[in-house]
Image (cartoon, grey):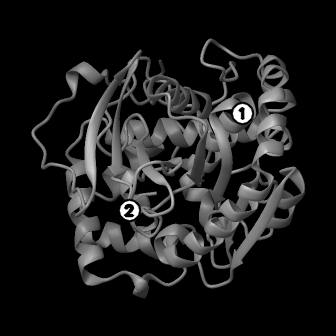
Amino acid sequence: MSSTELPFVPATSVLPEVVRVRVAEGERLRSVGLPGVTLSIRSRPPARAGLPPALYVHGLGGSSQNWSALMAELEGVVDCEAVDLPGFGDSPPPDDGDYSVTGHARAVIRYLDAAARGPVHLFGNSLGGAVATRVSAVRPDLVRTLTLVSPALPELRVQRTAVPTALLGVPGVAALFTRLSKDWTVEQRVRGVMALCYGDPERVSPEGFQHAVEELERRLRLPYFWDAMARSARGLVNAYTLGGQQGLWRQAERVLVPTLLIYGGRDQLVGYRMAQKAARSFRDSRLLSLPDAGHVAMMEYPDMVAGRFRELLAEVGALGSVRGADASGGTGDAVSEAGADNDGTATGGDAAGASADTGD
């Protein structure tokens, strides 16, 4: 490891005294131990028994809290769970230090296999969108529908406002940024993130802003915070450069389930122009464009996102048996083409790629 590389911090050595993660009214938080990783799962008890399961995957720097507003909107529609990816939210780092897109996807697959909840309605935002795309491509048996909010998929011309996030993955940059920003207040940091991620930061309530400040204060006390951020950013950049069957756009083409794509017209991290490419790449896609939204439409306009997802569910209800047959029939080919490991995730040096979500 070079002297500029961030050291790997094993999970067993990072148990500092920090304030507890906020759990909103009506939510529950539990820890699930799996081979090589421990995941924190946020859930909202369904309004009634028998609702289909859903799993939400957050973006870079975010947590399961990013989905709380949408989970509340959909509590009468699906049985909601949101995962904290390894090293984020309340989940400790992975035992092997793997923060690649493949590593994060492997963690999601291990949870879904262990929980036996699949197939689920899978949601992903930004980095979580790349992770959800990979999961859907290599394990279609685990996914019933896919909803992607500003997914971090490769762009040839990255927006200038997204470059600093990509640079976070360069060895030494995170440490340099930490030194340069040591005098910034937590409030200043949160305002900067919200200005980057929201189409209109004024939509954030004073209470929501205070909750974000408290959460960032908590995370900054974690010795692995910057390590997880930098390695995940590096992983996403690496995933952007992969070609062949492991390329994210190639995997998007192999997704067979009904897919809802949501893009914000004011997104400073994922180009709005990518919406049409995504709509062409995912075989069974429909597109929701929100001109005033930024990078986290599910936080800015949860009612609109929920409404369009309900429409998707209605479509799936009419076509479900056909889609299910198609998805299960494609499982073997999708996995074997990717060169999958025992979890069904594509192997190889792919890692996670650049986005800088709200805490996302």
**Whether residue 118 can be seen here:** yes
Q: Position of residue 5 (x, y in %)?
A: 45, 28
Q: Please provide percent x and percent y for residue 50.
A: 47, 48
Circle 2: element type:
helix
Report if residue 185 is visible in the image. no
Q: Earlier in the sequence, mark 1 or mark 2?
A: 2
Q: Are marks 1 and 2 in contact (CB under 8 Å)?
A: no
Q: Position of residue 338 (x, y in %)?
A: 79, 22
Q: Quadrant of residue 266?
A: bottom right
Where residue 145 appears, as percent x and y from the top left, is 68, 49
Give the camera-side residue of 59 and 287: 287
Which of 255 and 314 lies nearest the eye of the viewer? 314
The image's mark for residue 59 is none
Type of amino acid under label 1: Pro
Give neighbour class at mark 1: few <14, some 14-19, many 20+ (Cα, 10 Å).
many
Q: Indicate whether 212 appears above or below 217.
A: below
Q: CA distance from mark 1 to mark 2?
A: 26 Å
334 displayed left or right of 114: right
- Along the line of sight, the residue nearer the viewer: 196 or 52: 52
Residue under label 1, please give it.
140
Residue lying at 66% horizontally and 20% vertically, measured from the top left: 344
- Numbered badge on residue 68: 2
Dot in front, 1 or 2? 1
Residue 244 falls in image quadrant: top right
Q: Residue at x 59, y 78 (%)?
A: 293
Q: Tell which of 216 and 337 is nearer to you.
A: 337
Q: From this view, report whether residue 144 is shown above or below residue 246.
A: below
Mark 2 neighbour class, 10 Å CA radius: few under 14, some 14 to 19, many 20 or more: many
